[in-house]
Amino acid sequence: MIRFSTAGESHGEALIALVSGLPAGLPVDLEFINRELWRRQQGYGRGGRMKIETDKAHILSGVRHGKTIGSPVAIEIANRDWKNWEEKLPVESGDPAKHQPVASPRPGHADLAGALKYNFSDARYVLERASARESTARVAAGGFAKLLLRYLGIEVSSHVIRVGRVELERAATWDEISAVAELKEIVLGCVDPVTEARMKEEVEHASRTGDTVGGVFEVVVHGAPAGLGTYANWDERLDGLLAWSVMSLQAVKAVEIGRGVTAAESFGSTVHDAIHYSKEETGKPTRFTREQNNAGGVEGGVSNGEDIVVRGYLKPISTLRRPLESVRFDTREATSASYERSDICVVPAAGVAAEAMVAMTIAGLAQQKFGGDSADEMKRNFLGYIEQIRSY
């Protein structure tokens, strides 16, 4: 079973990702993984932290001579900002006068709930782990999942469809979406330049007013076969697993599969995807087809062979340069919320982190279905299953 976990604090020495269950013999493209980490740092509206960090994956175990060896893969991503925090967040007790407590919790963050839960006198330790900086380790782990899916011919990419009040008002093709990941400069990750320019204005407005702005990203899985997930048990349904994985990301407050939101206000005759059958053409296999993909590639908890489409709804970042009202931890007196260096808009970065989570989910289900202790064995099983579908 493919699993992963992360460790580390936002201003700690490093972030760690541990991935287990990957088959042996999978070629590892470190440049690709570092490119994924770079993509997560991009986007108009990012804060000063991104000017400090240049995230690179340092593989400690599980890869030798450019391929996985079947044992757990440990990845370290150093925090360059650590040099500014060594005395503020020492491992040992250190000098209390140099520590940097968070005196008043920020509305919308984990500060207050976490401090109450763990009996902390301030929110520093809560902030350090609850921070979206943790998603860096997820992106590194997800890079390995993407490499495994690519080995099977499955791709995962994302784009931004809304920032604040500005929304992309047309469907995007797979070629447009996948091209976003290849850009040398990522502004807001929207496939339409005119809409992206309007999105940029929305971010600029938030910046001028000391505010933050959220939005919606869309993750698409291209090339996944029918049959991933199952309707047999509630906790193995593909849509449930996807929603869980994306909702676990910091600041994501809602998840949509396909056109789930608009489907709720529509008639069934306009929502459900009619099924057709494509007869064999020269060079093309016969297959079941859909004129639309309102279901987002998932029916009854199982992938149906169409693109899997997942949208994440991201709230505005909780740390504001114009702080909201709060209360001091020590005196319980009214005050303004603490301010930590923060971003204005992170929707494109959240999309990259969501790609990692979706890739991990799909890779895990693929490994369960097709098995194999080596990448080649898994691919043989996968191709055999594809042939079974085509001859159905």
Image (spheres, rainbow, N blue to C red):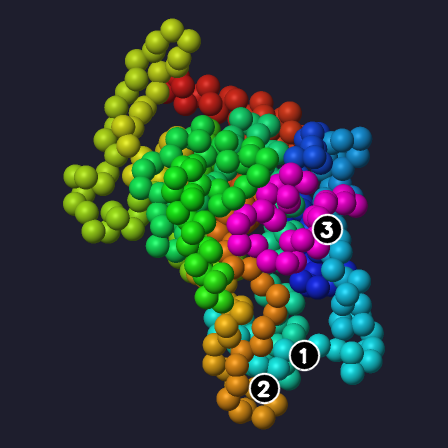
Q: Residue at x 25, y 47 (%)?
A: 263
Assign a secondary structure to mark 1. Answer: loop
Mark 3 residue type: Ile
Mark 2 residue type: Phe
User: What separation in Å lies between label 1 and label 3 (alpha carbons)?
Assistant: 25 Å
Tell me: residue 235, above or below residue 370.
Answer: below
Mark 1 residue type: Pro
Tell me: residue 213, above or below residue 233.
Answer: below
What segment carries the magenta color? Answer: 34-60
**Residue of label 3:** 77
Quick check: is 315 in the magenta stretch? no
Viewer-side residue, 147 vs 72: 147
Quadrant of the image occupied by residue 71? top right
Mark 3 crowd level (few <14, some 14–19, many ≥20, 10 Å Cα): many
State the mark number for residue 146.
Answer: none
User: What separation in Å lies between label 1 and label 2 (alpha carbons)?
Assistant: 10 Å
Mark 1 crowd level (few <14, some 14–19, many ≥20, 10 Å Cα): some
Could you tell which of marks 2 and 3 lies nearer the N-terminus?
A: 3
Tell me: residue 240, above or below residue 115.
Answer: above
Could you tell which of marks 1 and 2 lies nearer the N-terminus?
A: 1
* Front disc: 1 or 3: 1
Cβ atoms under marks 1 and 2 closer than 8 Å: yes
Quick check: is 56 in the magenta stretch? yes
Residue 305 horizontal/vertical position (percent): 39, 30
Viewer-side residue, 186 vs 362: 186
**Residue of label 1:** 101
Could you tell which of marks 1 and 3 lies nearer the N-terminus?
A: 3
Q: Residue at x 54, y 48 (%)?
A: 43
**Residue of label 2:** 329
Residue 138 horizontal/vertical position (percent): 61, 50
